[in-house]
Amino acid sequence: MNIGSLALWGFVATIVLTTLMAASRALGYSRMGMPFILGTMLTPNRDRAMAVGFVVHVINGWFLAVPYALAFESLGRATWWLGAAAGLLHGLFVLLVGLSIVPGLHPRMASEHHGPEPTRQLQPPGFLGLHYGRGTPLVTLAAHVVYGAILGGLYRLAGQ
């Protein structure tokens, strides 16, 4: 595995994904903010949560770039379209599995089964993240496809 390429392009892909998701919030396509959700898992301070969550999100993005690099190395090639396909699978996993388990892990998020209370004030994402807006599934998939395309298109295999 090419660690230097992985570190650089994993960081770039994560920043682009995070920026696309933030832009989708600003433009009204989605209300989901993963840095905020991650940050409020770790701190009750809502002002500090964005900064804490951003750091966690970048670290997660770097960590999740590793399976992409391993897949590219295993296949002996890295292309933007392979990365985009992996990003589509990644985005589907986030929407179908990841978001559904967040309420069970998040100390300040209500669940589908138990409503808000004094310590659980955040709205759960719901199926496909639809509680955060009808555009949430589309922008989440698009951002993950771009993430994968960046990794696939720019990652250089070890020994090249």
Image (cartoon, helix red, strand yellow):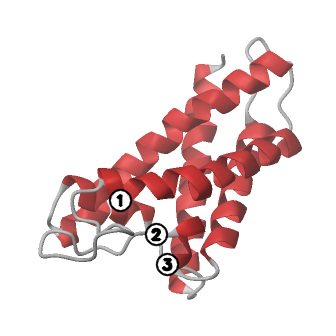
Tag 2: amino acid: Pro
Q: How many angstroms separate mark 1 from mark 3 (CA)?
A: 13 Å
The percent position of residue 144, horizontal first and vertical second, equals: 67, 55
Do callouts 3 and 2 mark residues in contact (Cβ within 8 Å)? yes
Residue at far top of view = 159
| Res 157 → quadrant | top right
Which residue matches tag 2? Answer: 125
Question: Front-most of 105 and 50?
Answer: 105
Residue at far front of view = 113
Q: How many angstroms separate mark 3 from mark 2 (CA)?
A: 5 Å
The percent position of residue 78, horizontal first and vertical second, equals: 83, 31
Do callouts 2 and 1 mark residues in contact (Cβ within 8 Å)? yes
Helix, strand or loop at disc 1? Answer: helix
Which residue matches tag 3? Answer: 131
The percent position of residue 125, horizontal first and vertical second, equals: 46, 69
Q: Who comes first in sequence, dot 1 or dot 3?
A: 1
Tag 1: amino acid: Pro
Helix, strand or loop at disc 2? Answer: loop
Circle 3 packing at 10 Å, graded few (<14), some (14-19), many (20+), is: some
Helix, strand or loop at disc 3? Answer: helix
Of the 4 image quadrants, the one containing the N terminus is top right
User: In the image, what residue occupies the spot 57% across and 87% down?
Assistant: 27
Q: Which mark is residue 103?
A: 1
Q: How many marks?
A: 3
Drawn side of residue 152 relative to residue 93, left or right:
right
User: In the image, what residue occupies the spot 64% across and 79% down?
Assistant: 135
| Res 139 → quadrant | bottom right
Drawn side of residue 92 relative to residue 42, left or right:
right
The percent position of residue 146, horizontal first and vertical second, equals: 72, 56
